[in-house]
Image (cartoon, rainbow, N blue to C red):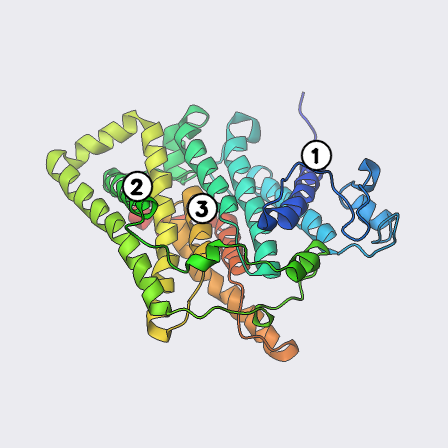
Amino acid sequence: MVVPDWIWFVSVFAYGCCIGSFLNVVVCRMPRDKSLVWPPSACPACGRHIRFYDNLPLISWLILGRKCRFCKAPVSPRYFVIELLTAVIFLSLFILYFSVDVIEGMPVFLRGGWLVYLLHITLLSAFIAASAIDLELWIIPLGICWFVTGAAFIVSALGACVIDAGVIAKYSLLPVASAATGSLAAGAAIGLAVSGALLMTGLLKRSYESEYADPDSEAQADDSANGDFSKEPDEMPEQEFNHRLEVFREVVFLLPVIVCSVVTYLIVGRVFSVETLNDFLTKHPAVAGLMGSVWGYFVGCAVVWIVRILGTLAFGKEAMGLGDVHLMGAAGAVVGPLMVVVAFFVAPFFGLAWAGSQMFFKKVRQIPYGPFLSLGVFVVMIFHDWIWNKIGLMFYPY
């Protein structure tokens, strides 16, 4: 029995609404280290628990007239916007992947395509939450990025169990390592472990250590609980740092990663031939997928971290945040090294458009960059095949 398309569309839209409702919980609670499951949702004004029939995505907000049933306090439109945006993105990606003949080589939903789709909507859902938090508090919780990165590693490793490995590699459905990138990724992972151990032992000091303390004042928490996006970072007190010294600590942290990746690449290249390594990766697609995702993660982190370091050294002020580094690392683990680099260069166009509009409507001195990076990633997902055919085959001529 063939399921009509409209049933798929309605189901995916409804599922997106439900995920969007959960993302609202993430936006409110995660930056404040609160549980995402307990206590139940409550009105931030009167504290009364919200009944299940008042918590239906999209519908309840409209029926209640954007107010709490009990105290009549206004409910931020953010809740409705995030639910609707998530549902629209879920549905749009579903139609593009499975109902429009655009994505060549994408397996049908029930024959493996669901795995790629599930990973991509996980990434986009996380980025919606991260972007909302970045717009509100000018921070990106690293837990969101780490969750996506972990999911990408698992799916990339197990992808060949669901989809033919040749199809994955040919159409770049998931990251796949070559002999060179696999050895670089393995070395970088070893170097990251070394740097992490040095941090844990205290031999290396974290940069901007005060950022690891809770940055939210009681006033911030009250504003954000009500969905207020109006708070500007310029209104918050800033601690003085020697920014060049702080970023130098990050350079020292990255040295083991760079050195180990290069050394591993050279050693592996001397011990094994390229043909032997590629044959091994072909016979072990789980290793190829995992290493491909790991390499995508490091490339995604690198493109932002390089700009952060060079910008800070040049201007003496912190350029981009570490949250942006982890955000693009997660994106690279999902879409691969090539696509995440393209996304990084697409993002400034959105940033410039937003900054131009602010010149006419509101004077600001700082731009939260996470939402623009997220838009760049979304664009490369939409135009994946065009980018792959124009650029990807130059580097990966399968």
Q: Nearer the viewer, residue 173 or 68?
A: 68
From the image, tell me which residue sits under label 3. 330
Give, as a three-letter code, the residue at label 1: Ser
Work out whether 363 lies above or below 82.
below
Q: CA distance from mark 1 to mark 3?
A: 28 Å
From the image, tell me which residue sits under label 2. 193
From the image, tell me which residue sits under label 1. 11
Looking at marks 3 and 2 on the same chain, the residue that comes earlier in the sequence is marked by 2
Q: Quarter-wise, where is residue 248 in the image?
A: bottom left
Mark 3 or 2, closer to the camera? 2
Can residue 372 be seen? yes
Q: Residues within 10 Å of mark 2 (few under 14, many from 20)?
A: some
Quadrant (top left, top right, bottom left, bottom right) of the N terminus: top right
Q: Nearer the viewer, residue 30 or 167?
A: 30
Q: CA distance from mark 3 to mark 2?
A: 18 Å
Q: Residues within 10 Å of mark 1 (few under 14, many from 20)?
A: few
- In percent of the image, x 31 and y 59: which residue is there? 249
User: How far across and down, in percent of the image, does residue 277 sit?
Assistant: 21, 32
